[in-house]
Image (tube, rainbow, N blue to C red):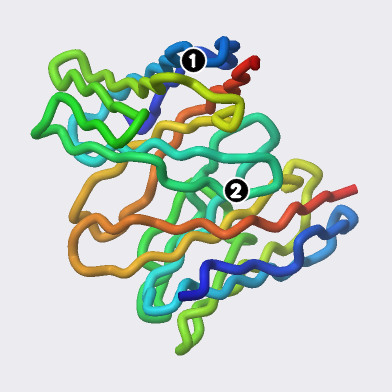
């Protein structure tokens, strides 16, 4: 059983640029959630995808968008990067069975915006 | 009502001692309370979780105590070891909702001294 993987590991961008982060779900999982973890803080929920549809969103602006593909891998896109977007971006996958399901986190992508 | 408050921010414990981390929540709709452990450069990993129908759950050296009336829950790490040194996050979620998003506390940095 393969775990959740994310790419790239680290990324440096400048303000105003766009970035795409990628996540491969754990085998057999059909739901992916994205979280933003600022330095010294707990992860903050960005959104969740289930069966390729957005299935809930946290308090993040529309410039944060995502995709889930038929193989359940996912992308997080952030447009018009701001300095405050610098954070660790975590992807978590789970198997939606109608009740709470354990979320398995990947190692994250460290994004630095200069 | 979506907040989960965690304390202390940091904790130093001697090897063999008991580490205690506390969390409080406001939203009575929460019914799933996991604890996550995060090592530097890694994503959070589930340690132990509890639902409000029990007051205590133990797994090895890790115990969750839950007080529904006070809306508080805590993590006890017995016989703390240097390998337990990590950041610990409590979280809360509403089971069975359309989106199983986790609301995280701000984290506790635990250092176990040999």
Residue furthest out toward the bottom: A70
CA gap between label 2 and label 1 equals 34 Å
Res. A90 image quadrant: bottom right
Res. A11 image quadrant: bottom right
Residue A83 falls left or right of residue A4: right
Q: Nearer the viewer, mark 2 or mark 1?
A: 1
Image disc number at residue A36: 2
The location of residue B31, given as percent across then percent down, is: 19, 39
Residue furthest out toward the left: B53
Image disc number at residue A45: none
Residue placed at 21% from the left, 49% from the top? B95
The location of residue B35, given as percent across then percent down, is: 39, 36
- To which residue does mark 1 refer? B16
Comparing A60 with B76, the one in front is B76
Residue A110 falls left or right of residue B52: right
Residue placed at 15% from the left, 22% from the top? B68
Disc 1 chain ID: B
The location of residue A106, given as percent across then percent down, is: 57, 59
Helix, strand or loop under label 2: strand
The location of residue B10, given as percent across then percent down, is: 59, 15
Helix, strand or loop under label 1: loop
Residue placed at 45% from the left, 16% from the top? B19
Disc 2 chain ID: A
**Placement of B114 over or under B81, stated as above or below:** above
**Placement of A69 over or under A7, stated as above or below:** below
Residue A2 falls left or right of residue A18: left
Mark 1 neighbour density, 10 Å: few (under 14) some (14–19) many (20 or more): some
**Placement of B99 over or under B79, stated as above or below:** below
Residue A85 falls left or right of residue A102: right
């Amino acid at each position: 059983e393969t775990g959740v993987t994310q790419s790239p590991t680290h990324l440096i961008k400048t303000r105003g640029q766009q970035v795409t982060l990628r996540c491969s779900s754990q085998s057999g999982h059909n739901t992916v959630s994205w979280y933003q973890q600022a330095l010294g803080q707990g992860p903050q929920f960005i959104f969740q995808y289930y069966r390729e549809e957005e299935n809930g969103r946290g308090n993040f602006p529309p410039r944060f968008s995502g995709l889930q593909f038929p193989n359940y891998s996912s992308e997080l896109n952030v447009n018009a990067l701001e300095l405050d977007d610098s954070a660790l971006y975590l992807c978590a996958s789970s198997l939606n069975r109608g009740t709470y399901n354990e979320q398995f986190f990947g190692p994250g992508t460290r994004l630095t915006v200069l | 009502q979506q907040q989960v408050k965690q304390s202390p921010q940091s904790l130093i414990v001697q090897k063999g001692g008991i580490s205690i981390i506390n969390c409080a929540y406001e939203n009575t709709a929460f019914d799933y309370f996991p604890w996550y452990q995060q090592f530097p450069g890694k994503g959070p990993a589930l340690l132990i979780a509890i639902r409000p129908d029990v007051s205590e759950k133990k797994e090895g050296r890790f115990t969750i105590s839950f007080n529904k009336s006070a809306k508080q829950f805590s993590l006890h790490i017995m016989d703390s070891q240097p390998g337990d040194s990590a950041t610990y996050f409590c979280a809360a979620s509403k089971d069975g909702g359309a989106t199983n998003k986790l609301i995280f506390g701000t984290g506790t940095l635990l250092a176990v001294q040999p």
